[in-house]
Amino acid sequence: MGEFICVFFSLLSMKKKIVILVLASRSSGNYVRRGPYDLYIELFWLPLIQKINHIPHIDIFLLFSKRTELYGYEKQLKNNVIIDNFDGVGVKLFVPGILSKQIRAFSLLVDKYDVFWNTNLSVILNIERLDNYVQSHAIDYQGHYVFYNLIPQHLDIYVSNSRKMELLNKYKGRTFLGGSGFFLNKREVKKIVHKSNIVWDLVNDLSIGLLMDGGSLYMDKNYRLVIDGEMDFMQYKKILDYFVRGDYIDVRLQQLTNVTMIKTIAEYYRVVPSSEGL
């Protein structure tokens, strides 16, 4: 009886294994001058990768299209990067291949993790809060931005009307989640990686939404804050203060390309002691 109780409580204490998949690219082809994407890697993601070294049930992988994109970060990212090797032979592949990078990662990791958080470089993540959310909630296809019943309208952007009708007849999904931050569980990822299911000639979030025939879910409260490129210093500092004091999971840097502003935001997180996630 005592052994049974020990096993029971051991199972209760087991944490869900989480992988964070970051759609990544570099700011320019020569990588000599650091642009916004390079700064996102250097100022936000590299420190976070170092931070999770002491969190055994969480891993982070940056998803790149080619190995040359690692220039300058080869040592720092050697254990935290997945390179897409999909050549597109036999399918019409949507450019720039974001979907193929994501499917590559799903295929490699599907049996290793319970929860997949999908995001991109322009997101500042509070890792402890994301972990707490995952451990205390049942996780399925859910995220910050839900496009309710808008798959038919978005298909008009990418495919012909005949192709649209073909897809809508084959797939049941009508709602999709914005690709800058959404969860999937292992069962859903296993469904996605069946190659015959994947619609390659669409953007990643729309293609995944088609497969999610059970609909999609908004996270039960708003866990994201947004800083956009039109804000002045006082406006985005106020948002950062909310982030530090609240229970938000992440901040989206939306269309933010101002290098000085990105550096200022990063410096703010380094000097604010109550920012437990950064």
Image: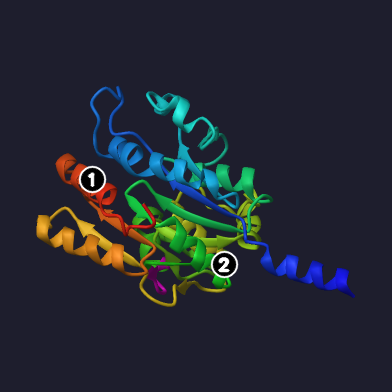
Badge 2 amino acid: Gln
Does dot 1 land on a helix, a strand or a loop? helix
Where does residue 221 sit, x and y in percent of width and height?
39, 76
Res. 255 visible in picture: yes
Q: Is residue 39 magenta?
A: no
Q: Nearer the viewer, residue 40 or 15?
A: 15
Q: Nearer the viewer, residue 146 or 40?
A: 40
How many dots with numbers?
A: 2
Res. 93 visible in picture: no
Does 157 appear above or below 264? below
Can you identify the residue that label 1 sits on?
A: 267
Q: Which residues are drawn in magenta? A: 146-151
Badge 1 amino acid: Glu
Does dot 2 land on a helix, a strand or a loop? helix
**Dot 2, how many residues are within 10 Å of its Cα: few (below 14), some (14-19), or many (20+)?**
some
Q: Residue at x 33, y 34 (%)?
A: 26
Q: On the picture, is 81 further left or further right than 157?
A: right
Does 5 appear above or below 84? below
Q: On the picture, is 221 further left or further right than 257?
A: right
